[in-house]
Amino acid sequence: MTAHAEPLAPAPLSGPRFHVEPNALYSELRRTHGSVAPVVLDGDVPAWLVLDYRELRLVTGDPVLFSRDSDLWNQWDRIPDDWPLLPMIGRKQPSILYTVGERHSERARMIGDALEAVDPFALRRHAEQLADELIDSFCGSGSSEIIGQYAMLLPLRVLARLYGFADEQGPGLVKAMNDMIDGRENAQAGQGHLAKSMFELLTAKRAVPGDDVASRMLADPSGFTTEEIAQDLMVMMAAGHQPTADWIGNSLRLMLTDDRFAASLSGGRHSVAEAMNEVLWEDTPTQNVAGRWASRATTLGGHSIAAGDLLLLGIAAANADPQIRTHASSMTGGNNAHFSFGHGEHRCPFPAQEVAEVIARTGIEVLLDRLPDLDLATPDDALTRRPSPWLRGLSTLPLVFTSTPALGGTA
């Protein structure tokens, strides 16, 4: 593609189309701007949105030219202290998200090793037990808002147990995380509770190690500080919670509205995996990711990228790129070439991806086993999405079913 003769107005990375018709919006941006589109963030801050599969692979595969070092950003002098995206695009953050080079590789290895050591049978057992506990709280009512009562609770409860938290701390951690995600007025208090709990966990595990992720990270010989490990654990918890919750909700919605997956509602395991994989292609929880920064002036998709420019990774747009989708008759069932877990050295570590997949699949399977006649309480076109260009998930998913007794014996 050649450079445009005249600059085209950048598109705002906001508005209802991101949660009503995102794929149509990405197609429109592709037709207007090509494989890379100029966009503006809150406060008219400029950035580039990488839309096409090939260009996204180039950006994520070249960590030298397209760095994860946010200090490179050429817009910092325009960013106020209360900019709403600072939690996502922070400066000099000590977590793995913003480290580069050898130090990043060491941190990624530490995290991968700690998660890879999780017993997969124990992981599924934890997920089943906590799923049953949550279902017991509403199975006797005949109805449930499954996002708030289940999907937004299960992933973090499982992760908290894997990290080494006591089960009684789980509900408080879930509330703190969900407050942070929702941007509520007590979001700062939620962040404080999460940080305080994480440092207390590491202090306790340093004194008395256990068979858990926190203890394994503390025992790593690379010499990371308690603060660095705490930051990485918080990043892992946030990255593992909301996208996995949305993966559960988006997959359940697909299975309840598409006849191809009807068998799953009576225990068809294969269809659960197929639905989950299709969601990663067609309705991925992680829509757009910030970001990468150009370490020097370059060109991408026919556009001139200045040194220090911010590039946003258009995960959903690249997954829907018509050029890549035409190379296979079906890019969904069984094909894992999507970008939903990223690409390159900063992609989601494979053990973390596996943990998320076990939690989501177990959560769906246990729910279908316990409540086999699940059905939508409202029409599919009445369901709403959270208004976010970053993560795509349902605001609510009201379901009805035949009331059943709790496993503990209470109705």
Image: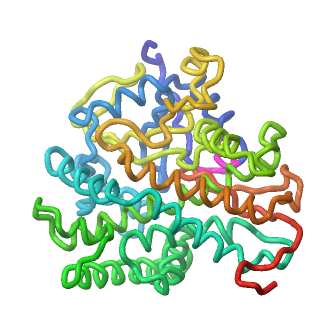
Query: As displayed, is residue 258 above or below residue 167?
Result: above
- The x, y position of residue 169, in whole percent, is 46, 84
* Residue beneath the point at 49% across and 30% down: 337
* Residue beneath the point at 82% across and 46% down: 257
Along the line of sight, which residue is nearer the eye, 48 or 133?
133
- The x, y position of residue 352, in whole percent, is 40, 53
Along the line of sight, which residue is nearer the eye, 317 or 28?
317
Q: Is residue 145 magenta?
A: no
Provide the residue span drawn in magenta. Answer: 14-19
Quadrant in the rendering for residue 319: top right
Q: Is residue 233 left or right of residue 159?
A: left
* Residue beneath the point at 80% across and 43% down: 263
Q: Is residue 89 left or right of residue 258?
A: left
* Residue beneath the point at 63% across and 43% down: 273
Along the line of sight, which residue is nearer the eye, 296 or 126?
126
Query: As displayed, is residue 295 above or below residue 228?
Result: above
